[in-house]
Image (spheres, rainbow, N blue to C red):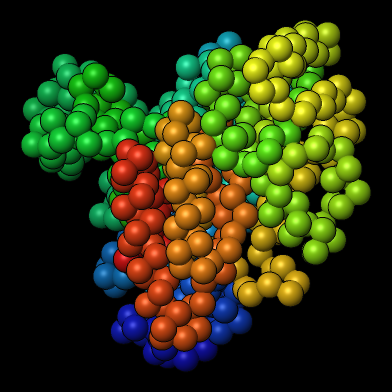
Amino acid sequence: MNSKSNTAVDVDTAALASKLKSNLAGEVRFTDGDRALYATDASNYRQEPIGVVLPKTEEDIIETMRICNEYELPVLPRGGGTSLAGQCCNEAVVMDMTKYYNRLLSLDEESRLVSVQPGIVLDEMRNYTKKEADLTFGPDPATHSHCAIGGMLGNNSCGIHSVMAENEGYGARTSDNTQSLTILTYDGLKMEVGPTSEEELEKIITEGGRKGEIYEKLRDLRDQYADEIRDKFPDIPRRVSGYNLDELLPENGFNVARALVGSEGTCVTILEATMKLLNEPPARSLIVLGYEDIYSAGRHVTEIKEHQPTGLEGIDDKLIGYMKKTGLNTEDLTLLPEGKGWLLVEFGGQDKDEADEKASKLKGVLENSDDPPNISLFDDEKQEEMIWEIRESGLGATAFVPTMPDTWTGWEDAAVHPDNVGDYLIDFRSLLDEFDYDASLYGHYGQGCIHCRITFDLETQQGIQHFEQFTDKAADLVLKYGGSLSGEHGDGQARAD
């Protein structure tokens, strides 16, 4: 290990590592190999960290923060490393919570609340809550088998079935499903945060101290910009870009926990999280609708949402073509009804009959409409899994397509209101054509969030200039529709200019 870091941060890494090792029960990894392992996430970026800490206890996290503060070094809390926008790599001391700091602390079945350490993987938490109480967590990214709750809190993650949480009045995002957080600031203050009445807020400020100072500054920030926040924050289910300043408004209960969700470790490190749970539907049924194109599918989203599905996803014919070229789940594709754009609509029920009844009701309504889609109703669990595998293959199918130029993240998660999905997709496809780019347009149509990997040229100067011109126009297009630069996966480094 070099005594000096070869990052842009000037620090005696040998002395730093030695001090951390002598004060922590967890692992301290500063070798070149360890740093290389943590130099990337699922994004376009590669940035070697100063070093890596795997804390075992809360005291380890507090000590790591204290020592890094002493050295004036940045700290980056990290979960599963699945971020697409570069949140999980930087020139910082990385704290990987997933190996040790990953316990489920308590489950309150009556209140439908679960408390966890941030390193726990989503599926591990959900498997426990389903087994013990038939409860689940609404947001479920495609990486549910290996993304950590801390990362979901950092990115304000959503997922395929987050419409289920929306149906129960929780909202689609992780922030909407957060009850409270125990946090640690860079200067070492530990506190529990959550909703705060105006009376409680004034009491905290009057009592003074570091917490009072922080709350006073947050209140002043809110009061200064409250009218602009109310007027200009996009009123859509999937606004993930930026800080959640709207959660500090009086009508939203000055909820510091929800305001911090989505801040990607830039403000605090999360020590514990108490999350809201939903009733898990014991049975599900799936109906797949085939349209003449993905734009027609998008224009029917609002009509279908009125039937309150537990999932509402869209895929286009380009994605199917990519899957055939890459050989991903091709045996599943024969299940799709005829079309060039599809909506996957899932319903839940207390038993299979109830779920089938909801799906059959939608099928009947659509069959009697003026321009009915092609419809396939699935109530066989194996076939339903095969259909969802098509949707979850989206990222893999679009990442490396034989005979096609490389595709990249960089503009992959913009969101608009679900009412505007069809028209937005038409305009966005026109913009892709203008720049001679190609991409599949799939995603969480029920909440207006569109995923795509685009054939950017990021290897030549001309290509990069072309990319910058495109993202500038793409941002203008999203603003035209009152949308958000990101409806999932956070801001990271990718949403910067």
The front one of 289 and 175 is: 289
The residue under the point 86% across, 22% down is 379
The residue under the point 51% across, 77% down is 457
Q: Position of residue 296 (x, y in %)?
A: 59, 35
Q: Position of residue 324 (x, y in %)?
A: 82, 58
The residue under the point 39% across, 32% down is 236
The front one of 472 and 82 is: 472
Up-down relation of residue 348 to residue 254 (above or below):
above
Q: What number of labels is visible?
A: 0
Up-down relation of residue 57 to residue 409 (above or below):
above
Q: Quadrant of the C terminus?
A: bottom left
Q: Position of residue 281 (x, y in %)?
A: 72, 17
The front one of 423 and 360 is: 423
Can residue 203 be seen here? The reply is: yes
The front one of 157 and 36 is: 157
Up-down relation of residue 405 to residue 210 (above or below):
below
Quadrant hosting residue 96: bottom right
Quadrant hosting residue 398: bottom right
The residue under the point 56% across, 84% down is 32
